[in-house]
Image: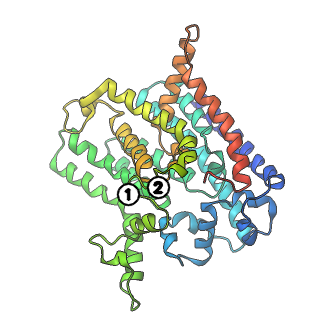
Amino acid sequence: MLADVWLVASFSCAVRLTSSLVLLLASSFVPAFDDSASLVLPVGALQGFARWDALHFLAIGQHGYTLEQQYAFMPMLPRLLASLDQPEHAILLVSCLANLASVAASVMLYSLVLSLVDDRRQARLAALLFALAPSPATQSSPYNEPFFALFTFLGMLCVQHLGLLANLVAAGSFALATSFRSLGVLHAGFFIWPVLTRKISLVRAAGLLVLTAVPLAPFALEQRRAWLLFCQADLPAPSWCSRSLPLIYSYVQEEYWQSGFMRYWTLQQLPNFALAAPVFALSIAASASFYRKHGARSLPFSRSASQIVLAPFVHLHTAQWLLLLFSSHVQIALRLVATGPVTFLFAAELLLSDWKSSARAGYCWGELWVGYCLIWGVVSLLLWAGFYPPA
């Protein structure tokens, strides 16, 4: 097992170092489509790490939340960027931390998959495939995904154990994940799952339900802070304050980022759907494979659901890709795929199947996924360095 951990960590380090070097070099010769980074970063070599949301994070870190649309972002990464006064120092520091978090997440994923399937080979492959996830720039830049993945995997690993301490660590890890991305609120479901699927005492059920509040807390506190700032001030209140559930997050997503059910399904977004298609194809195939095998037995209130260890993970995975496909900017799937275990566990299973059946005719889907990640990974780094889509 230690040999596996060393292999995973070494491979992940090599990939992250290579990605960072490509970004550094590409920033020197790929012409920038947008010069926003040059306005805040005098060091040209680091401008390739300050793209898209990273500029929002840096602005929030330097000046606080000054615009409504900035409330689409959770505060933890901006706080990391605020730890140093000079923007170039902050970008360099948090980029290094993101690389370290990504490496740690790959090791954590290995431990998580091993606890779920008890197969060292599949766990090792899943972790190696995670290191090759199709958005390498966001794993090496000041972005939320590496940190979100690390704390998500840690929480998922701890929640497999039934002890109080493990559940407390899991809740704290999920809360940290939420402080980076609001999607972490869905992790509260891991504490509801045992209540629905196992015969447990009322005391333990009550304790688990109390723990569901912990992953929700960072999001709730941020929404309350915005409500006090905008809705309780002497100035005229914005329209969202009068909603039955006055959440600035949902308002900002609708008003500024055009998120919402089917709002992204337009002809002009077809290129983004095409770019995200391989990720959605694998994600949907992973869910379909699981539900085809287990069906209704994996659903809540089923007597056998508690015996299917992958069930809550696949349910969360399915909810996430449905949310991304129908209510979000679909290209976000390219980076969010590196925040959950199911896609990589399934990709590892496909790859093992390819190797077993290499003599037979047909597509090797696992090898196709690896090829896609390698080719798109290089292309996406060059696009990222030049501030070209996808975000």
In depth, the one of 171 and 184 nearer the eye is 184
| Disc 2 secondary structure class | helix
Mark 1 crowdedness (10 Å alpha carbons): few <14, some 14-19, many ≥20? many
Q: Is residue 39 above or below residue 211?
A: below
Q: Position of residue 8 (x, y in %)?
A: 62, 34
Q: Position of residue 131 (x, y in %)?
A: 61, 38
Residue found at the far bottom of this picture: 234
Please name the amino acid that badge 2 sits on.
Ala
Q: Position of residue 17 (x, y in %)?
A: 73, 45
Q: Is residue 129 above or below residue 239?
A: above
Sequence-first disc among 2 and 1: 2
Q: Quadrant of residue 91?
A: bottom right
* Residue contact between numbered discs 2 and 1, judged by CB atoms under 8 Å: yes
Residue found at the far left of this picture: 202
Q: Residue at x 47, y 24 (%)?
A: 119
In the image: residue 74, left or right of residue 368: left
- Does residue 332 appear in this view? no
- Does residue 107 appear in this view? yes
Determine the CA span between mark 2 and mark 1: 8 Å
Q: Which residue is mark 2?
A: 177
| Label disc, if present, on residue 10 of the rendered structure | none
